Amino acid sequence: MLILSTNNSEGVGFWARLREDWPKVWPLLVLGLLLRVLFVMVGAKIYYAGRQVDMYTNGDSYSYALSFQNLLHYGRYTFDLTEPDAAVGRLPGYPFFYGLHYLVFGPKWVLFATACTQAVLDTLGIWLIYSITARLAGERSWAPLLAALLLATYPFSIVWTTITGTETLGLFLVLLWWAVFILAQPKTTNLLLLGGLLALIVYVREFLGLCLAVTLFCLLFRNWTAQVGITRLRPIAWVLIGFLMLYVWWPVRNYVTLARFIPLKPAAAGYANLREDAQESLAWMLTWTNDVTASTNELLTAPNPSFPADVISTPAEHQLIDSLVMLSRTCASSFHVRLKPGAVAAGPDGALTDSMRYYRAQLGNTLHYNNCNAIVSKGFRRLRESYIHRHPLRARVDVPLQNFEKIIFKSQLNSEGGPLNTTQRLTTLLFAWRSLVLVMGLIGAWKFRRKVDLWPAILFAGGIFCFMAVVFRTMEMRYLLQADVLMLVPAALLASLWLPRRQAPSATT
């Protein structure tokens, strides 16, 4: 019978395990930190050249930064003072992480300071993954060193260290969750702290809240086989109490602010360019393609927009899509923001960096006149329902299969029709490396499925892959970072089988 060993009394404890592993892992921590410092100081300028405004920001950065800055300067936690729902568009985990750096280092150095902290957190993740793998593999396996080396040199972790966004912080917290879950003793205090950590993970990135479901499932399984009666539920109760003690303030605050129960955030998340017109158009596109960027560009900018024949197949649908193209370009509010970005009043001097001002300008102003959102939404909904009616299987299977292929075999970048430059060629090779390691991780996850301390990673990674491919569908590779890194552990376990066992450590007296 399998009995989950998570948090059991056989372990040496979380902090004791980290101290024990320090002499073995510190050289890899030095290597990992040097690579990340080198990337922050030199590599990021090269890697991000021509891709975005600067090496510190992407399209989401402004919403995290402005959420805190508007709270500080205007007393309102929101990334857009003109949009009511922007007050609940970003959960507070990362904005306050950014805000701490803003308060300490000021607007001039906040982005650089945040990048430095993220480089350190990413380095500490190497320590965590070593200790996790050592718990799974034992002292005489090469797997802990292999896992730590893989993460120390993992390019898809390193490239996110400079970006003002949740990827690096979310990765560190997920690794910390797994380490605490399998190493810490099952004391009440530890279970409460684990629940608080899970709430913090949700605050940083809501879909990482899958960690909570995985935790509850694993605890239930362990206690169902090892205990009887109500004692089976006691650890689960303490974790939930710890979680709710930190999490409950968010929905309470949202209800007080907007008089609505919003457990996480609304569908549009307060973005003026994601109102119902854009949401319905995306829902239509995601029934037949996973490349919504190209389809949206076709809809909004192509001189003569055209869509696949099996998507728009009847004269009535051709007439409908023509009218929707015209309406989307003229009076649909979300598309209006995308096509005609306007300036939003900036904060006080020093409140925004130049890059943040740029992204805020891209957001545009909310329309204050009657728009045609309802007509556009209804039209795209009709097209979606028609496609599902005509292709019930394809509408449910095609895009998930495209996404699963992208998850495993993503190997090239969009070069916009031109030849790939040197950076893009290098990135293509790195994606091939990622595919190889991920396939090894999936094989290792199956081979070592009886190692129940590996279950949190298997369930989390499998859940993320399936959610992004089947449910969310609008998949970006950065959404997979945490799941990818967890799969480094079974990949290292598998690779260690091809190496001779290490010499047992000598006994000391």
Image (cartoon, grey):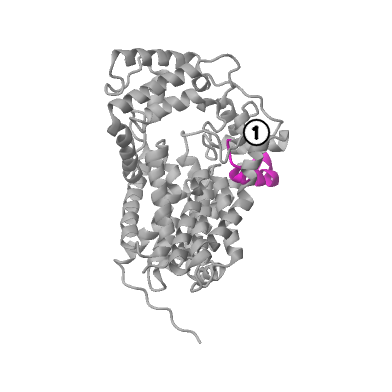
Residue 154 in the image: above or below residue 23: above
What residue is rendered at 56% in x and 58% in y?
237
| Residue 49 location (% of width, % of height) | 47, 36
| Residue 244 location (% of width, % of height) | 60, 51
Q: Name the residue under label 1.
A: 259
Judged from this view, the residue extending furthest toward the bottom is 509
Residue 167 in the image: above or below residue 71: below
Q: What is the span of residues highlighted in magenta in the rendered image?
A: 89-110
For badge 1, the amino acid type reads: Ala
Element on which disc 1 rests = loop
| Nearer to the camera, 363 or 224 | 224
| Residue 397 location (% of width, % of height) | 30, 37
Left of 371 or right of it: where is 148? Answer: left
- For the stretch drawn in magenta, what is the main secondary structure? helix
Is 169 contained in the magenta span?
Answer: no
Q: Evaluate whether residue 187 shows in this view.
A: yes
What residue is rendered at 55% in x and 53% in y?
198
